[in-house]
Image (cartoon, rainbow, N blue to C red):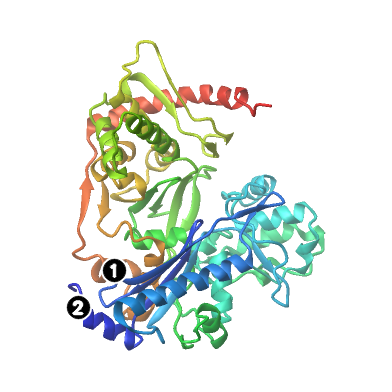
Amino acid sequence: MGKPSYEETKKYIREGRAVLGMELGSTTIKAVLLGPDHMPAASGSHSWENQLEEGIWTYSLEAIWGGIQDAYGKLRKDVQEKYGEEIRSLGAMGISAMMHGYMVFDREGKLLVPFRTWRNTITGEASRRLTEAFQYPVPQRWSIAHLYQAILNGEPHVKNIDYMITLEGYVHWKLTGRKVLGIGDVAGMFPVDEETRDFDREKIRIFDQLVEGENLPWKLEEILPKALVAGEDAGLLTEEGAALLDVSGNLESGIPMCPPEGDAGTGMTATNSVRVRTGNVSAGTSVFAMVVLEQGLKKVHPEIDLVTTPAGLPVAMVHCNNCTSDLNAWVGLFREFAESAGMHMSDNELFGLLYRKALEGDKDCGGIFACNYLSGEHITGFDEGRPLVARRPDSHFNLANFMRANLFTSLATLKTGLDILLKEEQVKLDCLFGHGGLFKTEDVGLKVMTAAAGVPVSVLETAGEGGAWGIALLASYLLEKEEGESLEDYLDQKIFAGKKGSKGEPDPEDVKGFAAFMDRFARGLAIERAAVSSLTEEN
């Protein structure tokens, strides 16, 4: 489908056929409205920040609903200004948010403790015990780890739990009255059964046995949402939900809603990486890669999270806390130097200049070691980080190698996890789809990522659209899917067909150079441990 005309889009909105997607990210709540070509015709956003309250990273209910209403209100205003139309009805809609976390409610629907987000690392003991009991990796950020830690801590609210859910599932519940969750974030709450595409009943039984002595008034299954896969009916927007979303009162009830999904699932959808042997890598402040598996992994790897696509296919996820933050700090230092010398450059000019300089460097970065850890990394066993650069006296130290080393280290921990998948587990991966800040200087991002992964990497022209677009596409799939049409086929044939992009193939010499850098990186982590130990807070 070509780009629709202004009048076509205007009519599409007026007839209530447009599709709404909303995502509550860690710093931005975004709403997008899709036109006839499945591309954003209007948008609205709201900036917010988590709060540290009594040692817990959280967002208040007031911040959640105030942010949702502001983002929707700005979308509504954008539609009015662009098309002169009021949003009264929609073809479908969907809600996405940060995965994982812990929201628990009593029978009256009251939140029992402040929302505990994915960012909290307060569930180490529960994570270890559950991983051992299930023989399945249970990261600290999973809902079940938060619940079990609360039980281990003897927290009094536990006995009053009637419902446990993640953020997007909570918002969906309030908009529809339905206690459901998309399978992608079901897999971020608790292990799933790949065959039934539901919570793993055997592991539920194991959990209930673990807490048998606590005499709790509930069983785990009783407090969990219903698992749904992409395309399944997740309920309709109620009158109360419409009033919550649109404070102007113009939005009508009865709008079909797709299963609410986590940001990993919407990221996979937005990059068309939901088919077996595909994957996506998001490289920005943090970096994660998700690979759709043909079959389950042979071993339990604490470094690898196991989740699913929105359709329920198994996915291996490598998640790293650190990517471009230290690299950006170095670019900021060079900006300061340039401005001190009277030179003013835009971000695109400065990043482009320095990133492309890295392509002139030695394949192995000339013997330079760099570690980008601003914070801890569970994959390599660090609770804290100390960014650093080190070299031997005979290292080839110049700007090109310095920039190349800092680009390589931004992906070094990710490569540690990818090597487990691609080398140890022999997972087959045909292509990675890249998105995020690292790919803004596209030619360099592709070159570095293909060197790290050793597989082709593509960046689509839609790579910057993000998760709000992804959940809107899942809502479109609910609305438009034909009998028996898979999510993979729908995206391939109706959304991404004809979309342009760039593709990078791995250069054998670059792959060899990255491997040499990784040998140095692995040995250099001893320097990083010494730095964490020695560079403590100064009095």
Q: Give the left or right position of residue 242, taking residue 144 as reference.
A: left
Point 71% across, 52% down: residue: 149
| Residue 385 visible in the current orientation | yes
Q: Residues within 10 Å of mark 1 (few under 14, many from 20)?
A: few
User: Callout 2, which amino acid?
Assistant: Ser
Q: Residue furthest top?
A: 393
Give x and y (percent) for residue 31: 42, 69
> Which residue is depicted at the point 34% across and 44% down?
438
Relative vertical location of residue 440 with respect to residue 244 in this rendering, above or below: above
Mark 2 or mark 1, which is nearer to you? 2
Asked if marks 2 and 1 touch (Cβ < 8 Å), the reply is no
Image check: 162 left or right of 83? right
Residue shown at 77% from the left, 52% from the top: 153
The residue that label 1 is drawn on is 489
Let me know if residue 196 appears in the view. no
Report x, y in % for residue 33: 36, 74
Q: Position of residue 163 (x, y in %)?
A: 67, 70
Dot 2 or dot 1, earlier in sequence: 2
Single out the residue that lies furthest toward the front. Answer: 342
- Provide the secondary structure element on which disc 2 rests: loop
Q: Which residue is mark 2?
A: 5
Is residue 413 depicted above or below 26 in this figure? above
Callout 1: SS: helix
* Mark 2 Cα-neighbour bin, 10 Å: few <14, some 14–19, many ≥20: few
Instruction: Specify the quadrant that holds the N terminus.
Output: bottom left
